[in-house]
Image: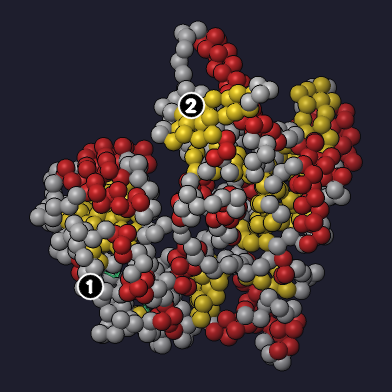
Amino acid sequence: MILIFSEEFDASTNIVLSWLLYYDVKSERVNRISASNEVYSFYYNNSKRSSNLNFRKKTNNYTIDDIKTVWYRRRPDLINNISINKNKRLEKDIVENITNECYAIYISYAGKFDNIPSLGNPRLENISKTYQLNHAIKHKLPIPPTIITNNKNNLLAFKKRYKKIIIKPIQNLPHHFIQGKVYAPYTTILSKKTITHLNNNFHPCLAQKYIDKDFEVRSFYLDGKFFSMAIFSQSDKQTQFDFRNYNETHPSRRVPYKLPEYVEKKLKSFMVDLGLNSGSIDIIVNKKGRHIFLEVNPCGQFGMVSYPCNYYLEHEIAKYLIKNHEKK
Amino acid sequence: MKKTHNYFLLFSNCIPVKGAQRSIICDLQLNRYRFIPTLLYDILQLTRNKKVTEIKKIYNNQYNKGIDEFFKLLIDEEWGFSTNTPEHLPELDLKWETSSEITNFIIDINKDSDFNYKEIISQLNELRCEALQVRSYEIINTEIIIKIAELTSGSTMHNIEFILKYYSELTNDFFEKIIRKNKRIRNIYLHTAIEEKKEALPNNLGNIYYSIQKIESESHCGIIHSGFFSSNIELFTESQHYNNCLNKKLSIDINGDIKICPSLKKSYGNINDTPLKSLINNDEIKKMWGIDKSQIDVCKDCEFRYICTDCRAFLTDENILSKPIKCNYDPYTAQWKN
Ligand code: SF4
Ligand code: SF4
């Protein structure tokens, strides 16, 4: 059986599941940890004498030996929307507690499944950008000059040195839904004027040298293979900094790309060193053709690479998952 | 072209297709196409392996100005770009795959049709069918529509379409109510209506298209028109290998007879006694699914062949590989009749 942790509305998971059915391979999808009507029970025993895990969903009963592969697609929704207490402040605290508790359970699953082949790793879901960049340097991948600072003079000096700089979130931030509109964090140019408006000290921000790009590359890494896509932002001003912010009527051009072999080699050793067997890698190719590493997102979307490039990545993932599997 | 760049390339999702008289470039990302002379089609076949200067030489430097102008135009209109590393921008793989045993199903209903919808939908789920079309030529009970909407709401089908004969109970409110419960229902077409109009349901629940046209049987189907052309990866790739109307399609006609499409004569049994599953490896059906455009008379020489849908039910003559009779285009003269 293939165990899949995902979210209820993740469309990519649906397509992979359909491929698993096509190959007649059994799988169980867990969208939610904590009490819910998606009934499953589990029993976890970690005593010295017996280490055990039982897992039951609807009428199917599994022990850890039945699980041949685990796919950590997405962190499951941790809890249902609950309404516990009229005191909103208290309710928020309780929800937060349960969320943390569930997260710990999710992580302990992962600990229990250490010897089972898996795709993804929940413990590496949130590796910080700075940690990634240090690793990139170790593997001789060019990165943009980067600082994190809370000080105006540092920021001004950085700007003076590199002329054009950008700021971006230090960690991947969630999108905000406010009055029917979506607000997503994105990368933007930092002007001198903005800096002069800042106090001497402020909340720390991550700044990078602006790279005059030829195009961007989004590469989905799967077990040693790269499925890459070039993104040519069009002349439109809006898309020049971050393609996520693109203008619907003027979308950027997305086509298959083959990374140079020496870049793939370095990226592969980088991923292996981090302990990631899949992830979505962002790269900028500058005007001189240099490939500059930006970041890797361990549970990144692959649908946005798969469809435009006709890669059928959901099929590739299904094939990877059933490698360790005999038919039901 | 940038001065420092030696190569011109079309974006790999902008693909030239050669016709008997003229050619087109199909932009599979932006859903558009543009005509090009066949000379340019031939030149575009060379760009991946030859520098622009080398291409010019092949034509004895006779067309230098024309080639420069064309490439510039294609870059300005965003069909292509210049580069020094064409080897890193591979062609689009034109494979087409599906994990479904059948991808689309049609149910034709008349007032006397009496189907076990629960059983049919459960069979479709098992085959992981993706799209369902329900069509009626006579007034059918609203209960049937509600029932189908309910049965498909947790199903594998994520695209459900109704083409129904209009009558007074089929109101916007009626459809709003059922679509609210099942958002997989995308489009509603009502024929034999009192007026021609398109009504948008609130909250992006979709559109209802009213048409005064009277549709009395399945013979309305199969119209080929440039307004129905669609330049996208799915249709373009499927058309390379399979019949882009019939591939992975099964249907039942008003009597419950299982056919590839209700307009085709051949029946493979009745839904009451033949499981759909027993037909998915039927050689004859698979052969029909596999009639791609390169096998069809006339279409095989038409520049629109991968953005135009096909019809295998209404043909020019007896030959199953003949051109759809409802198409008015002649690729040899590049003219549409009337
Ligand atoms: S083959 Fe022709 S009649 Fe049959 S569904 Fe396709 S277009 Fe309609
Ligand atoms: S000739 Fe064939 S491919 Fe061309 S428009 Fe007509 S039906 Fe379509």
Q: Which residue is mark 1?
A: B266
Q: Which quadrant of the structure image shows residue B264?
A: bottom left
Q: Nearer the viewer, residue A87 or A56?
A: A56
Q: Amino acid at mark 2?
A: Ser
**In this view, A294 is above or below A123:** below
Q: Tell me where residue A38 appears, x and y as whole percent.
A: 43, 30
Q: Amino acid at mark 1?
A: Lys
Q: What residue is shown at x 52% (from left), y 43% (from top)?
A: A1
Q: Nearer the viewer, residue B140 or B15?
A: B140
Q: Tell me where residue A150 appears, x and y as whole percent.
A: 81, 25
- Label 2 SS: strand
Q: Tag count in the figure?
A: 2
- Label 1 SS: loop
Q: Seen in the image, is A228 located left or right of residue B201?
A: right
Residue B197 visible somewhere in the drawing:
no
Within-10-Å neighbours for mark 2: few <14, some 14–19, many 20+: some
Quadrant of ligand 1 in image: bottom left
Alpha-carbon span between mark 1 and mark 2: 51 Å
Asked if ligand 1 lies within 8 A of label 1, the reply is no
Q: Specify the farthest residue to the top.
A: A87
Q: Tell me where residue A213 appears, x and y as whole percent.
A: 75, 54
Residue B107 visible somewhere in the drawing:
yes
Q: Label 1 lies in what chain? A: B
Q: What residue is shown at x 51% (from left), y 31% (from top)?
A: A55
Q: What residue is shown at x 67% (from left), y 77% (from top)?
A: B47
Q: Which residue is mark 2?
A: A41
